Image (cartoon, grey):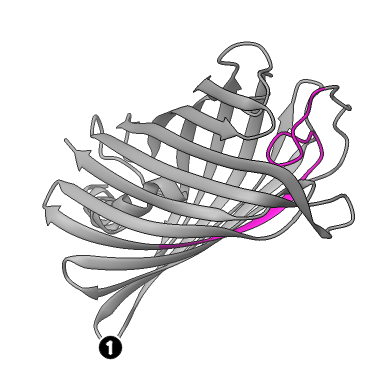
Amino acid sequence: MNGLIVYLYGMLLFLLPGTLLGLASFQEPWGFLFCGDYKTYQTDHFWNKHGKKMPAHNDFKKKTIEAYSELGLTCRDTLFAKAKYDTIEESLNGNTRGFEDFILGWRNLIQLKGCTLYGFESKLILPAGGTKHSLRYGRWGGQCSFIAANYFTIYERNVIIDFLAGYRCYYGFPSGQIRSHLTLAYDPSPRTQVLATAHLEYGVFNGKTHADHNMICFNPNYRLLKIELQAVFCLSAFSYASVGYYWHAWGVNVGTGGGFFATAAVQF
């Protein structure tokens, strides 16, 4: 068991910078992680229900501050929580500020075999308030996901492939979604890391119509493929900083565009 803890801790140090991208990290017992993230998003176009790119006639800008934390219970069980605060500016609908719906979750290591791990993750979505235009759905929800990660080396450099696949459902609104991501992480030097991630949010189109949905980010039935590139810098044995860019590569009933993000993380 001690060997397992040591291995997981080593994996954690490598995976830590990608936490906000969804990489599967497992804390030591009573280990604590905190990440702060700042993200921008901007677009003036959207994909319609046929996947055709259309002008929105609405300049949409969004700035997000995110707080994310993890707490290890055992070497196999980690709790996590996420909160986001948005500032939205729209030429058509005016300005909006407030919290997105909160997330509480539990991550469990099922098996560690060689340099491959398998895990399970569950999330509870807690409404931050009622439905609010362009900001949040304001609905209870949940997500269950399967996690797999493989660690190997290329020319003495660490590489990780991380995969997640799950299903998210809400109480009545919006559509249920197949959620998945695939991440490739590579460290070109001992103190730096680069990551490329593809995120898929694939609505199954069972969501009820909403009278005041936003065609850019609030449609009850949408599909989105998002690509993220990130560079991570190790500041010390317990702290990291990163910068990155993301863009919406494909979608249905959702906005095009993209933006930048920056992250800082500390572990205790």
Question: In the displayed structure, does residue 260 sit left or right of residue 100?
Answer: left
SS class, disc 1: loop
Q: Residue at x 37, y 41 (%)?
A: 38
Total marks in image = 1
- Tell me the quarter of the picture where residue 256 sits: bottom right
Q: Which amino acid type is shown beneath numbered disc 1? A: Tyr
Q: Is residue 161 above or below residue 101?
A: below
Is there any visible trace of residue 88 in the rendered image? yes
Which residue sits at x=27%, y=34%? 34
Q: Position of residue 106 (x, y in %)?
A: 47, 31
Dot 1: within a 10 Å radius of its alpha carbon, few (fewer than 14), some, or many (20 or more) residues? Answer: few
Residue 101 appears in the rendering: no
Q: Residue furthest left?
A: 236
User: For this rendering, which residue is in front, 27 or 208?
Assistant: 208
- Tell me the quadrant of the picture where the C terminus can be found: top left
Q: Which residue is at a point 68% across and 39% down the rendered structure image?
A: 217
Can you say whether 42 is above or below 182 in the image? above
Residue 233 position in % (x across, y down): 21, 60
**Which residue is tagged 1?**
155
Name the residue furthest bottom: 155
Identify the residue at image location x=69%, y=17%: 131
Name the magenta segment's main secondary structure.
loop
Up-down relation of residue 90 to residue 195 (above or below): above
Q: Can you give x and y, in whole percent of width and height, for residue 50 in the image?
A: 89, 56
**Residue 234: percent from left, percent from top:** 17, 58
Q: Which residues are magenta?
A: 212-229
Q: Is residue 161 magenta?
A: no
Q: Say which of 194 and 116 sits in front.
A: 194
For residue 150, side relative to residue 181 (left or right): left
